[in-house]
Image: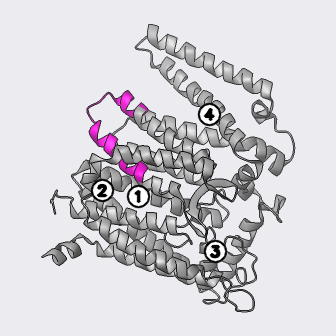
Amino acid sequence: MKKFKIFSAIDYLILICVISLTLIGIAFIYSAAIDRDGVLTNTNYIKQIIWGATGIVLMLFFACYDYRKTERYIFWVFVLSCLVLLYTCKFGKIVKGSHSWLGIGNFGIQPSEFCKIVFIIFLAWYLNNSENENPTKRFIVSAVILLIMVGLILLQPDLGTALVFIPVFLFMTLVSGIEMRYILLVLGVGTFTILFTILPVWESNIVRHTVPAIKFLTDSRLRLVVTLAMAAIVLVGFLGLYFYRHNKYFYWIAFFAGIILISLISSKLVGAKLKVYQLKRLIIFLNPYVDPKDAGWNIIQSKIAIGAGGFFGRGFLKGTQSHLSYLPEQGTDFIFSILCEEWGFLGGFLVFALYLCLMLRMVYIIKTTPNKYGAYITTGILGMFFFHFLENIGMVMGLMPCTGIPLLFLSYGGSSLWTSMICMGIVMAVKYRRFNFMN
């Protein structure tokens, strides 16, 4: 009877997709380790096999575990996660300029990866238990939860990982019924913060001449004037709303001016924390040829690899961009480039199809789950997978900024793989208990 229940908890469509993507990832991590002479330069694929095997065990464990029990202790897990992130900021290993790793010797984990799960479950817990609260308070508390997690990760600084939390937040708050104006506020602040942060670097590194339209971002005095002006407009808007309660114009004036005001302040803080080369990576996709031997190198070589694959590809282990070491980060961020070079359009289409099956399955589970807590969790996981897929594929094609976000299941890395598999186990648990079965 026990075995029957365990096997009943498994969603075999998800399991097939996960195992297929993981095996494809292992194959191309192996391919990425072969040099021009056909010599294996590292054994990362073996580590990935170990992480994949243990990850499947974790996935099956969480598929059988009643996710609803997490409501009892998720608050304290969230607090602990914040403390771990603080510790990592101070004492973590420096990898690619960020204090984002903890470990001993060659063994290390990236706490921010696992914090994605904690954030999703904690936000789901709050949204589920605050449905009868004031909508404005509900949004503010949710936004504070987001800011705490994003702020701690930006301290490392790890902009790529921090960005993942924003679409997760947007997906979950949209499904939870939070008013659209609040969601637009977060989306607007996030978008303008990124724009205001990178535009000065874009001016100096891409167009390479003064752009009058963004002088308010590059001239510190003018920036202060604009910031104070926006603050004054917000104040006038609130005063107008107070004295003329039925006049919505004042509300929207304060709303949009507030977005600009918050973005100006937050972009200054983010810009002060991030290094120039990190900001440059975010905009170099617009024209990688302005710095073809440094910041634009990865994108140029990635596009060459994808184009060289054609429809059928050059064949497994027969790619040149990876084996001749033209493509950096080929086993992690740019693994999709190797796949397209060796398996061509058909290989890329296979990965697209497997991801589409996973995400459509999650949509189905969200729609058929009466338990809102489970639906919110699954929505957050869907948002995470969607953003990882969109950003990584767009990045290697030169359509999105280079943020160092891995392609889940395929890219080399134990923390990322375990996080992805735990998430899939939780999704299976939500599906299994969608009619509130206790076992």
| Quadrant in which residue 44 is drawn | bottom right
Neighbours of disc 1 within 10 Å: few (<14), some (14-19), many (20+): many
Whether residues under marks 2 and 1 lie with C-beta atoms below 8 angstroms apart, the answer is yes
Q: Which residues are magenta?
A: 118-140
Answer whether residue 119 is magenta in the image.
yes
Query: Disc 2 to disc 3, how far (Cα)?
Result: 32 Å
Where is the N terminus found, in terms of image quarters?
Answer: bottom left
Whether 113 is drawn above or below 191: the answer is: below
Q: Which residue is rendered at x = 45% and y = 76% of the image?
A: 52
Q: Residues within 10 Å of mark 4 (few under 14, many from 20)?
A: many
Cα separation, mark 2 vs mark 4, equals: 33 Å
Image: 174 above or below 21: above
Q: Secondary structure at mark 1?
A: helix
Residue 322 picture quarter: bottom right
Separation of marks 4 and 1 at Cα, in angstroms: 27 Å
Q: Tell me, for residue 337, which label it has, or none.
A: 3
| Disc 2 and disc 4 in contact, CB within 8 angstroms | no
Amino acid beneath label 3: Ser
Q: Position of residue 345 (x, y in %)?
A: 58, 79
Q: Earlier in the sequence, mark 3 or mark 1?
A: 3
Mark 4 / mark 1, whichever is N-terminal: 4
Q: Which residue is mark 2?
A: 366
Residue that badge 4 annotates: 263
Q: Which is nearer the N-term, disc 2 or disc 1?
A: 2
> What percent of the width, then of the height, locates residue 324?
76, 83
